[in-house]
Structures are given as C-alpha cells and as structure tokens.
Amino acid sequence: MNAPRPESAPPAPAGSFLRRIAWHWRHDEKCELWIGWWTLVVFYNLYGLLFFVITRTQPPPEPSLDPMEVVQWFGDRRHGLLYGYALVFIVGGATAIMNATLAYSIRRMSVSRAFAYSYLVIYALATLPGMLLMGVACTVGAMRPDRDPAVMSWLYDLAFLSFEGTMGVFLIGSLIWMAAVLLDENGVFPKWFGYLNLCNALTEVVVAPAWIFQSGAFAWDGSIAWWINMGVFVIYTTAFLTLLRRMILREDFGTGPLPELATDPAAGSAP
Amino acid sequence: MTSIASTRSRAHGSPETERFVPGQPDMWAFVLFEAFVFTAYFTVYVFSRARTPDVFRQSQMHLDLRVGVVNTLLLLTSSLFVARCVQAAREGSYRAATTNAFLTMLFGSVFLVSKVREWAMEIGQGFTFTTDEFFSFYYFLTAIHFIHLLIGFVALAVAVRQLTSPARRSQVIVETCATYWHTIDFLWVLIFALLYVMR
C-alpha cells in the first residue's frame, strides 16, 4: 500500500459520495490512513453523543452528592447508562486504530521512533481507566439500583475518579507530542501545534485539585477543573483532526520533509 | 520589552526575510492561547470573589504585599535581562547575550525561592490549599504560574545552547524563548494585581 498510485489508475471521480468512496477503496494508496482519520472523526462525535446525551455522565455531576442522591442519579439515567455503555464497549476497540493513526504522524517525523512508541503505549493504557473502568463502574451501579446506597456511592466515586485519573496520561502524552513536533524537521505539523500541546498539557495539571475538593471551581465538575479544560480540549482536538487530515493529503510515503499541498486539486483528494 | 523591528534579522544564523513579530509566529499563537486560558481563570476568580467578598478580603489581608512587590520586581528585572540578551544577540555580541540569559535565570531562580518561602510561611501560619476559597485560588494561580516558570528555564537553556554554539545561533529561536519568558512575566503581573493588590 505504500507504493505510489499506479499510472493506470483512473482519475478520482467527482460524482456521488459512494462512487468516490469506491474509487478510494480500490485505488488510493492512502486508504488505510483515511480509514484511521475517519475513525477518529466518527469516534469523537460518537463519544460526545454517548457521554453527553445518552449516558449523561458528562458534564460530570457534583462530587458532593450524598448516598441517596447518588442512588437517585443512577436511577434517573439507568437505561441511558446501560444502553450507552453497551455501545461504548462495542466501539471502544476503535481507540487502537485512532492511536495507531496518531502514532503514525509521529513516526513520519524526523524524530526518534521512541516518541511514537511511547505515545502509543501511554494512550493504549489511558483507555482502561478513562473509558472502560468508568463504564464498568457506571454499568454496575445502573444494573442493580436497589443496592446499598453506600455501595452505589462507592461506584459513583470510582467512576468519576478513574475518569479524572487519566489526566497524567494526557499530560505526558501531550508533552511527548509537543517535543516530537518541536524537534521534527520534516514539517509534519506546524510548530504552533507543538505549543498548543503544551497548553493542553498544562490544563491537565489543573485537574489535580479535583482529588481534594468536593465542590467549587476545583472539584471534578468545577469551572476550572472541567469546563475550561473541556474548552481547551475541544480546540485541541479540532486542531489535531484538521492537521492530521492535512498531513494525510501531503503524505508522500517518503522519509524526508513532507511536501506542501499542491494548488492543483487533482494532486490529492480526501474521501 | 523586546521591540518589534524590521532590522532584527541581521544577526548571524537568522533568515533575512522581514518578520512582523519577534521569534516564531507560532510562539505568539501560544501566547494568545495562554492569555485566553488565564483570562478564563481570572474570570472565575473575580466571580468567586464577588460571591463572598468578605472571605476574600479577610484572607487577602494575610498576604504580605511587600513579598508580592519584590516578586514582581524580580520578574520584571529578569524580563529586562532577557530583552538585553535578545538585543545583544541581534548585535552579534553572543558573550554578552549569554551573560544576560544567565542573569535572567538568576532572577528567575530568586523568584522561585522567594515563592517557595512565601508558601512555606503561609502554610506555617495555617493557611493551606483548602483553608478557604481565596487561598485555594492563591495556591492554584501561583502554582500554575510556578510551573510555567519552570518551563521557562527549559526555554532559557535552549536559548543559551543556541548562543554558545557557533554552529547554531538561531536568532529566531533565541527570540522565541525570550517571548515565552516575557509571557510568564506578563501573567505574573496580572496574578499579582488580582491576588495582592485588588481589595
């Protein structure tokens, strides 16, 4: 798949969406990269839908709820939690493709492979506490709402603290990506994205007080520990999805600097 | 402090093309973004203060304004030296530029020690991160600034490496590092005004 497109391949059609998809599937040497990129786009949209709308676990509820309020919280969204997390567990494996695509972008840089491998490993581990453990705790709570309120309260704390616990992973992951972008001489990403990684890393540090406070700006649902961070994360995610798409368009499967995008629209196209 | 000048690119190792900002424009994107993030933190602080003004006012009385002033002067002096470092590098005086970079580090280090000493003093008097809302913000804002400053030392180390190695000496990178340092200084002035001065 790394070979350049054969000369005999027909030009990309400008017709229907399905025809264009079929052309890319058969002739585009970047097909795997596009699958990875679309997986990222679909996953993040699905993540938003599942966590914000269906399970309603984001924005996070107050940490200061008493056991009876926690039971009420589980009861209010019982079906959302059960059906929502069933879907989360189905699509959870997609993180492997997403992480591979992100690691590929680092491998394309002129820096040591250690950056890409570290990034891959650290984000693979992040899926366990940040998504799966939280999902298990919420599902266990929702499955039998007649449990002892003290146990429900324990599950509630476990769910949200495990979610918050990924902050260190995102901190180090962002720093790895930052260092790779700033050291890279292949121009895979612009340097401002390296600095944006630093911003994102610093907002992860801000989550740390969530382990101490049960209310206010620094609690896990607080304006500083959650709302501002989420704002930064949305900008950061939008930036790297856009830059990854641009990287794929520019990809020449070489090892040197990535060529700039040609002004000729026929030179590269996205499905 | 580092003025915008079209003649800045004369120094050895820098591109001759006209630039509109000192250093990499990418760093200015960082400055802008950090300014937005800190504006959000400051807004939350001001709203929290407006909710319980008495708690904030009483707790604020325990901070020593003189310490805040000394901290500010230390960082402003460090910014002056980093500006002199950039100027010297532009003129090709790399020895002087390196000396100024080290002086920047020295004043930054004194700031760090002073800040740790102030924290120790406050904790010794029983004012910790969880004492009340004001002290939560005090420790949060000064600590996040402290972390930014630590990263600033990495930036200065990069600048020194550029200045001391004739094979490198990228004026753009030196100015990029200086821009970062000025940003930390700028953020501190705002934090100082909010925590120590605004009553």
Image: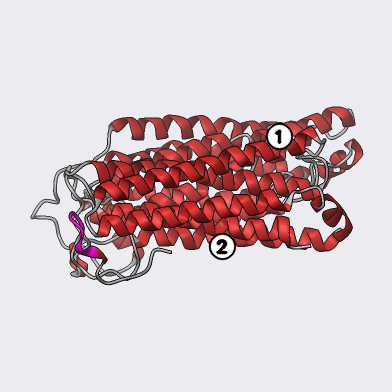
- Kindly identify which chain the residue marked by label 2 belongs to: B
Q: Residue B191: x, y in percent?
A: 64, 56
Q: Residue A101: x, y in percent?
A: 36, 42
Residue that badge 2 annotates: B36
Is residue A45 in sight in this rendering? Answer: no
Please tell me whether residue B48 belongs to the stretch shown in magenta: no
Where, quadrant-wise, is the N terminus of chain A in this rendering?
top left
Q: Residue A98: x, y in percent?
A: 42, 42
Q: Nearer the viewer, residue A133 or B115?
A: B115
Q: Residue at x 70, y 59 (%)?
A: B194
Is residue A253 in sight in this rendering? Answer: yes
Residue that badge 1 annotates: B120
The answer to which of marks 1 and 2 sits earlier in the sequence is 2
User: Seen in the image, is A210 located left or right of residue B158?
Assistant: right
Q: Residue at x 47, y 31 (%)?
A: A122
Q: In terms of secondary structure, where does tag 2 sit?
A: helix
Q: Residue B31: x, y in percent?
A: 47, 59
Q: Residue at x 34, y 43 (%)?
A: B158
Specify the segment rendered in magenta.
B9-14
- Residue A170 drawn above or below residue B65: above
Q: Nearer the viewer, residue B7 or A162?
A: B7
Asked if the residue under mark 2 is in contact with the one under mark 1, i.e. CB atoms within 8 Å, the reply is no
- Kindly identify which chain the residue marked by label 1 belongs to: B
Check disc 1: other Cα within 10 Å, few if <14, some if 14-19, many if 20+: some
Inspect the image, locate mark 2, and give the three-letter code of the amino acid beneath it. Phe
- Residue A169 drawn above or below residue B179: above
**Which image quarter: residue B83?**
bottom left
| Mark 1 vs mark 2, CA separation in Å | 30 Å
Inspect the image, locate mark 1, and give the three-letter code of the amino acid beneath it. Ala
Q: Residue at x 63, y 43 (%)?
A: B143
Q: Nearer the viewer, residue A18 or B121?
A: B121
The way the protein has been coloured in the rendering is: secondary structure
